[in-house]
Image: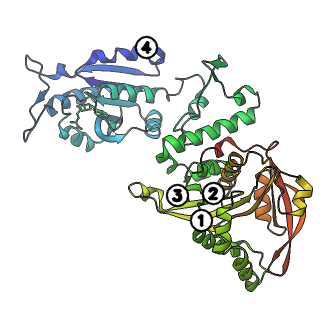
Amino acid sequence: MRIDIISIFPQFFDCLDVSLMGKARDSGILQTHIWDLRDQSEDVHRTVDRAPAGGGAGMVMKPDIWGKAIDQVIDESGANKTVLAIPTPSGIPLAQARVRELAENTDHLVIACGRYEGIDQRVSQYYQQLPGVEVLPFSLGDYVLNGGEVAAVALVEATCRLLEGFVGNPQSLLEESYELSGLLEYPAYTKPQSWRGLEIPPVLLSGNHEKIKAWRREQSLILTATRRPDLIEKINPDVLNKTDREILAAHGFLPAPFKRKVRFRLARVGEEATCSALASRLFPQACPPYLPPDAIERFIAENLSEQVFKNYLKDPGIQIVLAEIDAYETAEAQNKLPQWQPVGYTLIKAGSPGYLPPEENLVKATGENCAYLSKCYVEPQWYGSGLSGAMLEVSHFTLQKRYPHIVKIGLGTNLGNRRARKFYRRHGYRKCGQRIFMVADIENQDLVAVRDFTTCQIPSWAKNVAQ
Ligand code: SAM
């Protein structure tokens, strides 16, 4: 690739001689030519700027001087196609995808470094309509520099490291931030193992490559969700698996095709109407098809009324976690106050130390200090978004924090509900028996399953996210 840089401070680019950039030049992968714009000026003062047309502060760089400088380098290169990059704060933000495209498809790059108030607009206008030239006005970020030189160096370095033969292992480049996954890269560590009281995360020293890979993926997702939520909008949904979606949901995002923000919080005293309405709405959606509507109605009236939830909310041994979705899609939500709407909940009975779950078979299977996951419901439209799994793990984490005596959690789920059984299995619940569950006077066969927190720990991504 040939790069011509035009500037009134050519000495600025001495930095391109150092490190890998210098090597790339020596090896011929890259040819750089630095030009002094003032050489095109014809007056003794080597003037390149004049007062702005229409008045105002500062000076503007003259189009005739720039035209001569750019024509000269295009002619000299003899390239069929030239990209003319013009750094400007009003340009398109420079992003990895654009840089990669440049590295892969461009033989000749010219960078025109402005100073003062910038370059006369007609320079960009003229070259835009010239065959064989593509104009790329680009910005380094939402701030103003004194000149285009820093931006030019950034563009050269970002582009050149992607040229074939520039780095030893091109695979390493694909794992970086903004590349294939569209995520920020995971944090890196090296020896010493302990530094100023801070340790390398033990998983990285475990030698277990599967676990290391999973940890790095998790860190990438968390970093992206917390630092650059704007990137989540752009993730290709095909690269996300179930766990990825759960991690993102736990950190507030349901990426495409759902495109919503989500949050989890404890239900508060006084919210019995919200809880009862939600529970009553969700219960029928998860019932087996053989249950008649009047049995479902009776169950709701007896077990999910406002009065029942009023008592639950007052009971210090009961935890209700609500999942709420912002009514606005993430793209339109940016400048709006979120409108949180409840779409799912868990209800867990935990009691105080020595607690026995209110299910005979659970008591038999687990003994004391086993919480009972009495309810775990989500509106079906959010199935597959990661919301249910995140809600469950966040509920586990909150449970453990609030009730440290709890070491296990058990549940009953309809034997015929394969989706629920698979879901609980993925989340560490193991079959330990069966029970009869009554809906009004109809008997239902339930599978009883238990998760042991000592052998199946709560994932670190579920921590500190419930509000
Ligand atoms: N008057 C211009 C404006 O407000 O948009 C700012 C001109 S700036 C002082 C001078 C030159 O610095 C620009 O012509 C451009 O080459 C460069 N520059 C400043 N900020 C930049 C940024 N964020 N990205 C790329 N180039 C920048």
Amino acid type at image mark 1: Val
Instruction: Indicate which quadrant contains ligand 1.
Output: top left
Amino acid type at image mark 3: Lys
Cβ–Cβ under 8 Å for marks 4 and 3: no
Q: What is the CA distance from the residue labelled 1 to the residue labelled 2?
A: 10 Å
What secondary structure is found at the residue carrying circle 2? helix
Q: Nearer the viewer, mark 4 or mark 3?
A: 3
Amino acid type at image mark 4: Val
Instruction: Using the image as rendered, state which of residue 104 and residue 408 is in the foreground.
Output: 408
Q: What is the CA distance from the residue labelled 3 to the residue labelled 1?
A: 15 Å
Instruction: Using the image as rendered, state which of residue 395 and residue 236 is in the foreground.
Output: 395
Name the residue carrying label 3: 259
Name the mark on residue 387. 2
What secondary structure is found at the residue carrying circle 4? loop
Q: Is mark 1 within 8 Å of ligand 1?
A: no
User: What residue is drawn where x is 55% and y is 33%?
Assistant: 176
Q: Is disc 2 surrounded by few (<14), some (14 to 19) or many (20+) residues within 10 Å?
A: many
Q: Position of residue 308 (x, y in %)?
A: 68, 71
Q: Is residue 211 above or below residue 435?
A: above
Cβ–Cβ under 8 Å for marks 1 and 4: no
What secondary structure is found at the residue carrying circle 1? strand
Q: Position of residue 273 (x, y in %)?
A: 58, 71
Name the mark on residue 18. 4
Residue 15 falls in image quadrant: top left
Q: Nearer the viewer, mark 1 or mark 4?
A: 1
Q: Is disc 3 surrounded by few (<14), some (14 to 19) or many (20+) residues within 10 Å?
A: some
Name the residue carrying label 1: 343
Q: Earlier in the sequence, mark 4 or mark 3?
A: 4
Cβ–Cβ under 8 Å for marks 1 and 2: yes
Q: Earlier in the sequence, mark 1 or mark 2?
A: 1
Q: Position of residue 369 (x, y in %)?
A: 82, 50
